[in-house]
Structure formats: structure tokens, C-alpha cells
Amino acid sequence: MTIKTASIPILGLLTVRPMSGYDLKKAIEISLNFFWSESFGQLYPQLKSLCEQGLIEQLQQDNKSGREKKTYKITAQGQGVLADWILKNPVVRPQRDELLLKMFFASEGDPMAVRDHCLKSRTEAEVLLTRYEGIDAGLRDTTEDPEKARYWRMTLKLGISQTKNYIQWCDDVVKDFER
Amino acid sequence: MTIKTASIPILGLLTVRPMSGYDLKKAIEISLNFFWSESFGQLYPQLKSLCEQGLIEQLQQDNKSGREKKTYKITAQGQGVLADWILKNPVVRPQRDELLLKMFFASEGDPMAVRDHCLKSRTEAEVLLTRYEGIDAGLRDTTEDPEKARYWRMTLKLGISQTKNYIQWCDDVVKDFER
DNA sequence: GTGTTCATGTAACACGTTACATGATTGT
DNA sequence: ACAATCATGTAACGTGTTACATGAACAC
């Protein structure tokens, strides 16, 4: 039984602190947003399966409140599996970008509509950029776990520069349309 | 029956010239490589389905050779569907990048292995960059279909700048590791 | 004569999302 | 009171890849 890539974010984030499925979803959305995503439909069955494999385990729940909440922590075995996975060559996954596809075939439809798609996407990119820069600023001053912060900032650096480059491209596209 | 996104590259590329399934696969690999990909397992059933819907049709085959080869062309109806699809808001698909995931969790394993993954990926990016620039140069001097070439070059422009940015980031990462 | 490219197609599998079902807690 | 958020989980669906099956033509 080989480890599924979808469970890596779970193992990885549980090295930061014990978390519930719901927490993990949030953490993935906030921290891995630039290059990863996962849905509840995958997360919860994964947690179950990782428990069965002994890679994570459920904490004694602090059920002072009747609210059901399962908190998991990573096991030593889980840490080993994560370290092994990092060694393996990364699988390159096909990228699929509908906006670019619309751009590529713009002449077969209404090019001005494609320009508008671009503008909308540019706005979303601006929001992301602001968020990434905020996270990066927060990480710059972190004293706890500077080793983790180091690598987090490396991925953020790519996110920031790619997003800036993308915004610049959108501007160029819009300018080009003004001819 | 709504149109599947997977069939858009087929419709789009058939506006350039009639092609077979095999030709289309090649064309997708060469021209849409930066932002799209499709496997035979999806391509052939799609061709069948598009024929049934009347969006493409099979040409009279020139069976001088006994070699079986089916060439398709886009219909007026197909062109309409393509134009309609371009108008719709693009669906943003989640990106998944294993290298970035390894980078993010590098401190939980062997960071030097991640550096090596980066270097390898950098080499592949260099190859792509050279290819993109070659295609762009070829398109610059194209006299036929300048309207198509215009949009093709726009997508290429993003591909080139994103790839350059990525290579720069790889270099920064490697430099950072030398500390 | 051997390997590569051309060429089409199917079936099984893996992956991932969406929608649904359920209900407590918190903020306004 | 009402909405939003917290919280877990399943089932159905859709999408996409891999492996397999088959064979001709061409280059060396």
C-alpha cells in the first residue's frame, strides 16, 4: 500500500501542531493555496485511512463541550513516511488553465470577452498577492520554528513573483487589446 | 448535453486545419503544452462523441495507403459552440505541484534532496523555455493567419515569462541552500 | 530484422469534487 | 430568531490516466 499524495499535506501540517479535519482544510486553504487544494470529500476518508495505517493517531479528545471534534497528531511512523516521500522524484502533473485556452482560441470567438476574463482574473490575482505578501511579512519576524519558516518563505517567494508576473501579463494583454 | 472542456482543444485546433486524432495529440503537446494536455484515452472517445453531436465531421479518407487514418474537420455548428464557450467565465482549476509541496515540507525530510529536485526541474524548464522562444520566433514572421498568431503569441508570452521567473527562483533557491 | 513512429481504440482504475445529510455553537 | 461558522462524514458522479490490444509503415 503506497502512500497517496493527497495525504502528504495532512502529514506535513500535523508536524506543525495537532489538528482536526476541519482545521486541516483551513490550513491547506491558507498555507498551501498557491500550489495545492483538497476537499472534505477526500480529507475525511484520508484521515481514517491514515489512522488505520498508524501514520497519524487521534488525541484524547477534550470533550468538555458536547461538540464532536477529532484532533489528530502525526506518529513517528508518519514522520518517516513523510521524509521518504520528500526524497522521491516529484510527479509532474498536467496543468490546465481555461483562461489561457480561451486566450489561445480568442480569434474564434469574441476577443473582447477574453480581455474581460483577463481583467477579472487580474483582480483576483491582486487579492492573492496582497495575501501572500502579508503572510510573508508575518513569517519574516517569526522566531519559533525558523527552519520551517525558511522553506515556507521559499514557496511564498515563487508565489509572489509568479503572481506579479501574471498581473504584469494581464496589463500587457489589455494594452495590446487597445490597438 | 453541455460541452466538455476536454473537447475545446479539439474544436479549436480543427479551426487551423483538418486533423486526425493522432495529429491532434501532437498539436496539443506542441502548441498547448504550457497550459493544457490530453491523453488518447480521452481524445478518441471525444472525437466519436463530437461527431455524433455534429460539431465535427470525418473527411472522405484518402485511403491510397491501406493505413487507417481518420481525418476530421470542424462544422459550422462546432464553430458556434466554440465561440459560445469562449464567452463563458473560465473555470479556475486547482493547481497541484508536488515539487512545491516537497519544498514546503523540506524541513521534515532531507532538504538537500529537495534542492536536487529543484535543479532537475530547472533543467527541464530551460528546455521548455528554448522551445517556447523558438515557437515565438517562428510566429513573429508568420504571414498567414496573423489574427490567430496574435493570440498564440500572447499565451506564449506568459509561458516564456513564467518559465524565466521559475528558473530565476530555482537559482535563488540553490543560492539560499549554500548558506 | 529490429526498433521507432504512425495510428486507433477500449477497459479498468484512480482521483477528486459536489451535493447531500446532520447538527451544535457563536455572533448580531 | 437568524445567519454564519464549526464540525464530521458519505454517496454519486464526473473526469482523466494507464495499460492493454492491434497492426501498418518506415528508417537504419
Image (tube, coloured by chain):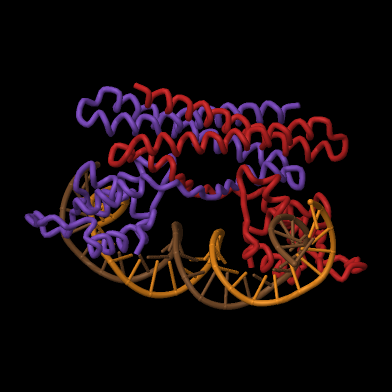
Chain colours: A purple, B red, C brown, D orange
Residue at the left extreme, as displayed: A64
Q: Where the C terminus of chain A falls, by quadrant?
A: top right
**Residue A21 visible in the displayed image:** yes
> On the picture, is A17 further left or further right than B147?
left
Task: Judge whether B72 appears above or below A173 on screen.
Answer: below
Q: Is residue A82 left or right of residue B36?
A: left
Q: Nearer the viewer, residue C7 or C16?
A: C7
- Quadrant (top left/top right/bottom left/bottom right) for the N terminus of chain A: bottom left
Where's residue D26, x and y in %? 84, 58
User: What residue do we see at 32% from left, 39% from top?
Assistant: B110
Task: Tell which of C22 and B106 is nearer to you.
Answer: B106
Towards the viewer: C14 or B110: B110
In the figure, A156 relative to A28: above or below? above
Question: Depth check: C26 or B113 in front?
Answer: B113
Instruction: Kindly indicate the quadrant of the structure image that contains residue B8.
Output: bottom right
Task: Tell me if residue B75 can be seen.
Answer: no
Residue A110 falls in image quadrant: top right
Q: Could you tell me which residue is drawn at 67 percent across and 65 percent down? A: B46
Q: Residue B34 at x, y = what percent? A: 62, 42
Give the total of numbered labels.
Answer: 0
Q: With respect to residue A171, does A111 lie above or below? A: below
Q: Position of residue A52 (x, y in %)?
A: 23, 65
